[in-house]
Image (cartoon, rainbow, N blue to C red):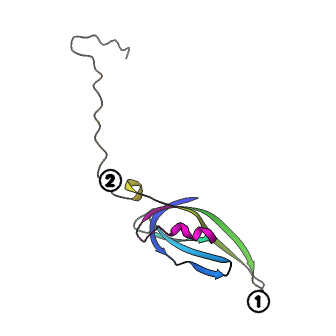
Amino acid sequence: MDIKGKVHEISEVMEVTSSFRKRELVIEYAENPSYPEYIKFEAIQDRVSLMDKCKVGDMVEVSFNLKGRAWNNPKTGKTDYFNTLQIWRVSPLSGAAAGAPVDEMPSFTPPDLSSAPGEADDLPF
């Protein structure tokens, strides 16, 4: 899955255990600019470096996998469910794709295909 948005926050690398590290990225997703969404992604292990060149305010495209898992709480016996958006690529965007304003489309004048004065129009329609 892919999503385009503006970098809102980048966490430091977190050493969860001696063999597991992660880093979080929050993207401002503004499909409707009046109501932006803030979506948190995570990168794990060697992918934490994917955000090294990003900075707050950059427009990026994030490619990610949707992960879900169940966890049985031993104290309550209840099953809880967790979802994670795991990053596998972060691509910077530039120009119009990055949300830069586009003034106007260039004007287009179609060519004149009519026959020249004095020539017969041989088109059947």
Q: What distance separates the C-alpha of mark 2 from that of mark 1?
A: 57 Å
Classify residue 101 as left or right of residue 35.
left
Question: Which of the image's four quarters has the C terminus?
Answer: top left
The question of residue 69 being in magenta is answered with no
Observer able to see residue 120: yes
- Which image quarter holds the N terminus? bottom right
User: Among all residues in the image, which is located at the extreme bottom?
Assistant: 75
Residue type, mark 1 in image = Lys
Disc 1 is placed on an element classified as loop
Front residue of 43/100: it is 43
Q: Mark 1 points at which residue?
A: 75
At 56% from the left and 75% from the top, the residue drawn is: 23
Where residue 38 appears, x then y in whole percent?
49, 71
- Going by the image, does 3 lie left or right of 123? right
In the rendering, at what x and y percent does residue 123 appear?
Answer: 36, 14
Residue sitting nearer the eye, 84 or 56: 56
Q: What residue type is labelled 2?
A: Val
Tell me the residue that label 2 is attached to.
Answer: 102
Question: Which residues are drawn in magenta?
Answer: 45-62
In the figure, 14 relative to 104: above or below?
A: below
Q: Give the residue drawn at x 35%, y 58%.
A: 100
x, y percent for residue 49: 55, 69
Q: Can residue 84 be seen in this view?
A: no
* Mark 2 surroundings: few (<14), some (14-19) or many (≥20) residues within 10 A: few
The reply to whether the magenta stretch includes residue 53 is yes
Image coords of residue 63 (percent x, y): 56, 60
Q: Is residue 64 above or below residue 10?
A: above
Sort mark 1 into few (<14), some (14-19) or many (20+) by Cα contacts within 10 Å: few
Of mark 2 and mark 1, the one earlier in the sequence is 1
Residue 89: quadrant of the picture: bottom right
